[in-house]
Image (spheres, helix red, strand yellow):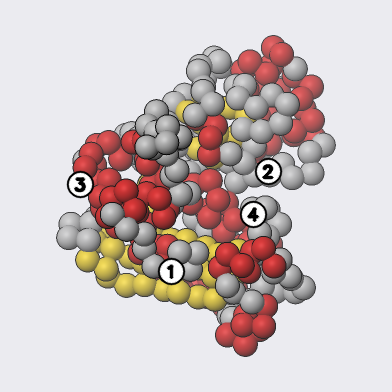
Amino acid sequence: MQLVCFDTETTGLDVQKEHIIQLSLVKVDTADWRIIDQRDWYILPEGEFDIPAEAEAVHHISKSFLLEHGVSLRSVYDELIAFTEGSDFLSYNGNGYDAPILHYNLARLGLDFHFDGRTWYDALLLERLHTEGQVDENGERLHNNLTAAYTRYYGHPFEGAHNSLDDVMATIEVFKAQISAHGWSWAQRDEFGFISFDRWLMKKGEYFYLTQGAHKGESIESMMQIDRSYLEWIVDKCKWTDEQTREIINPYLGRYTSPFMPMADSPAGTANLPSSRGKKRSKGTITDADLSLF
């Protein structure tokens, strides 16, 4: 199987507004973990942009560097599509961050990425499953950032953290260790199979839940009983709600004017980015640990 592991460096954390300034992708053959090919682009955003000092302190990418060395996302779009064609994906927090910010960066350019029909392995979510309830020597909950996970498996941190290409290489090594320790069946899960691009919704098992706001953790079904007007506010008035979220919530409100087109079915039990299949009007269960990604 071929996986494309990807990571981004950005101007900030808001997936709808911030800019990608480095995009790295490495294609690997999981039969022997051989690297097949890679791409690493420093991205110069179109129009005006700033890199806050706190962001530059993390990834060390300056505006002056991008003005001299950066390429536009538009100019590498065709190569991005060709490079990822037919491959599944691997990331470390890509389901919650890197995939959504890529979606919005492309959307601002009038471009699209075909997120459907792919399997999205997120090594962060898998690591959280592995370390759930564990504590360190001081009795504190284990950290699950990429450096901490890599150090647990290999006994030392990796070099180059917060350079997206180095992060990609480290993610591959962490995922290799996860598979070696737990097997592919453990990695093929659907508990966190959906995180909406605007991060309003997540899906666990059969059910959709709010990930933020006054009713964080409630299912859409329970919200129909608790406060239907809150769902109407999300759909009609919230300025950062994406069309994807509107098209998922609208059927619950009895609105069927713009049905959400679900993604293609993927292998049973695999972690996937957005799918509206299996919507079920029942509250289900969700825990604080489930929402820890947000």
| Residue 277 pos. (x, y %) | 48, 31
Q: For residue 261, what is the image quadrant?
A: top right
Closer-to-camera residue (242/130): 130
Mark 1 or mark 3: name the one nearer the start of the chain.
1
- Which residue carries the number 3 mark? 180
Task: Single out the mark in the foreground, 1 or 4.
Answer: 1
Q: Say what secondary structure mark 2 lies in.
A: helix
Above or below for 175 versus 38:
above
Task: Single out the mark in the foreground, 3 or 2.
Answer: 3
Q: How far apart are marks 1 and 3 (CA)?
A: 24 Å
Under mark 1, the amino acid is: Gly
Q: Residue furthest right?
A: 237
Task: Single out the mark in the foreground, 1 or 2.
Answer: 1
Under mark 4, the amino acid is: Leu
Residue sitting at x 69%, y 12%:
225
Mark 3 or mark 2: name the one nearer the start of the chain.
3
Q: Say what secondary structure mark 4 lies in.
A: loop
Q: Which residue lies furthest to the left in this view?
A: 32
Q: Say what secondary structure mark 3 lies in.
A: helix
| Residue 7 pos. (x, y %) | 47, 61
Mark 1 or mark 4: name the one nearer the start of the chain.
4
Task: Single out the mark in the foreground, 1 or 3.
Answer: 1
On the picture, is 221 further left or further right than 41? Answer: right
Tell me, for residue 13, which label it has, or none.
Answer: 4
| Residue 265 pos. (x, y %) | 39, 39
- Which residue carries the number 1 mark? 160
- Which residue carries the number 2 mark? 243
